[in-house]
């Protein structure tokens, strides 16, 4: 029997006690990941995920999430979902109940969530609205108004200037990655985010894209990403971590190799990228393009989680 273990990106530690409780009771890695991510989605202090997430350019919170099962390599994902505080549970329902599909977006994802009985609820908090409004430059606000009339052409015209003026969104917040290994030796990985604040409406990041922000395969391991989603999509970073792992690298070095590959891409909007990895034998590691990045880990034998350093590339 495997010793269950669960790991999470920064800010994911709020969910580890819920996740480890599932694993200690003999529950599946998938259930543990969903429980842990739900706790992070409910945490209003994290302005990058679930309730309290920061809105898009037009002031609407659009959420992305995915979950993947290492035993079957089945996955479910949703993107640009509004009005549902727990997108991870919609992704889980896609995985379990809609096996002919992997990814649902926008109105279709919301319709499906209603059909399977997932509760709607408020997502935009006062604090998130205030942060969004304060971070929006005068040009951004004017653009947000203009875009409602003129659409994408207006955004394109001003986009580089606008994003440069806003800089990298910064704060004690983060997209959440959770990866678990259960007593039966199965892996699962989950990711949930509100994506970049002030993003173009309908923008989907790596969190909802299997292979980019999330990948899980019992034969090799599981990996997930946070940070510059466009780079992780272009480089297929989560899957690329597993290629390194399969090639004999340890989890931290496999993350570092995948990040180096992504960091080679030309990209005007430089922002940090992180990866996290759990192997089928319980080894784990992470890497980041910025200094001081960490992740949390808890085994079924531990009373609480501990914080580990990521490798800096
Ligand atoms: N990866 C997320 C996205 O691109 C954002 C983040 O983790 O900072 O939507």
Image (spheres, grey):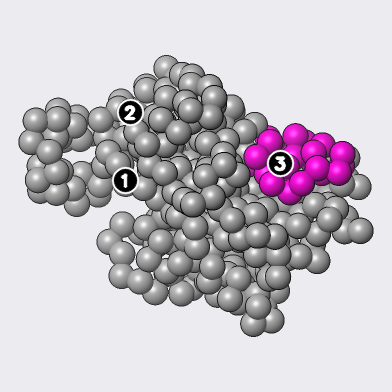
Label 3 environment density (alpha carbons within 10 Å; few <14, some 14–19, many ≥20): some
Q: Is residue 94 above or below residue 253?
A: above
Q: Is residue 285 above or below residue 104?
A: below
Label 2 environment density (alpha carbons within 10 Å; few <14, some 14–19, many ≥20): many
Q: Main secondary structure of the magenta part?
A: helix
Classify residue 125 as left or right of residue 305. left
Magenta highlight range: 11-36
Inspect this view and state whether residue 11 appears: no
Classify residue 4 as left or right of residue 107. right
Foreground residue, 92 or 10? Answer: 92
For the residue labelled by badge 3, is the local secondary structure a helix, a strand or a loop? helix
Residue 34: % across, % down? 65, 40
For the residue labelled by badge 1, is the local secondary structure a helix, a strand or a loop? loop
The residues tagged by marks 2 and 3 sit, at their Cα atoms, a distance apart of 29 Å
* First in sequence: mark 1 vs mark 3: 3
Residue 135: % across, % down? 32, 32
* First in sequence: mark 2 vs mark 1: 2
The residues tagged by marks 1 and 3 sit, at their Cα atoms, a distance apart of 28 Å
Q: Is residue 196 above or below residue 217?
A: above
Residue position marked by numbered label 3 in the rendering? 31
For the residue labelled by badge 2, is the local secondary structure a helix, a strand or a loop? loop
Residue position marked by numbered label 1 in the rendering? 203
Residue 213: % across, % down? 50, 56
Q: Nearer the viewer, mark 1 or mark 3?
A: 3
Any atom of ligand 1 within 8 Å of the CB at mark 1? yes
* First in sequence: mark 2 vs mark 3: 3
Q: Which mark is residue 60?
A: 2
Farthest residue in the bottom direction?
247
Name the residue rendered at 9%, 30% in the picture.
149
The image quadrant where one finds the N terminus is bottom right
């Amino acid at each position: 029997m495997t010793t269950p273990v669960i790991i999470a990106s920064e800010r994911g530690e709020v969910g580890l006690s819920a996740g480890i409780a599932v694993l200690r009771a003999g529950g599946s890695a998938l259930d543990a990941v969903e429980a842990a991510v739900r706790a992070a989605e409910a945490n209003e202090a994290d302005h990058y995920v679930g309730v309290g997430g920061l809105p898009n350019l037009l002031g609407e919170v659009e959420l992305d999430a995915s979950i993947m099962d290492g035993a079957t390599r089945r996955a479910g994902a949703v993107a640009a979902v509004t009005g549902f505080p727990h997108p991870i549970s919609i992704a889980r329902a896609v995985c379990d109940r809609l096996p002919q599909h992997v990814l649902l977006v926008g109105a279709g994802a919301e319709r499906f969530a209603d059909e399977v009985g997932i509760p709607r609820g408020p997502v935009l908090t006062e604090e998130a609205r205030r942060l969004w409004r304060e971070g929006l430059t005068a040009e951004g606000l004017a653009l947000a108004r203009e875009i409602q009339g003129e659409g994408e052409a207006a955004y394109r015209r001003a986009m580089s200037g606008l994003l440069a003026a806003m800089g990298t969104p910064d704060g004690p917040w983060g997209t959440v990655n959770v990866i678990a290994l259960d007593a039966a030796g199965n892996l699962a990985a989950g990711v949930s985010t509100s994506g970049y604040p002030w993003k173009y409406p309908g923008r989907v990041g790596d969190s909802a894209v299997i292979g980019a922000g999330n990948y899980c395969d019992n034969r090799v391991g599981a990996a997930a990403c946070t940070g510059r989603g466009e780079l992780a999509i272009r480089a297929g970073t989560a899957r690329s971590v597993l290629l390194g792992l399969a090639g004999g690298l340890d989890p931290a070095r496999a993350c570092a190799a995948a990040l180096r590959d992504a960091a080679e891409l030309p990209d005007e909007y430089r922002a940090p990228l992180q990866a996290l990895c759990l192997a089928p034998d319980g080894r784990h590691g992470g890497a980041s393009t910025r200094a001081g990045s960490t992740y949390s880990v808890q085994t079924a034998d531990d009373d609480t989680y501990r914080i580990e350093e990521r490798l800096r590339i």
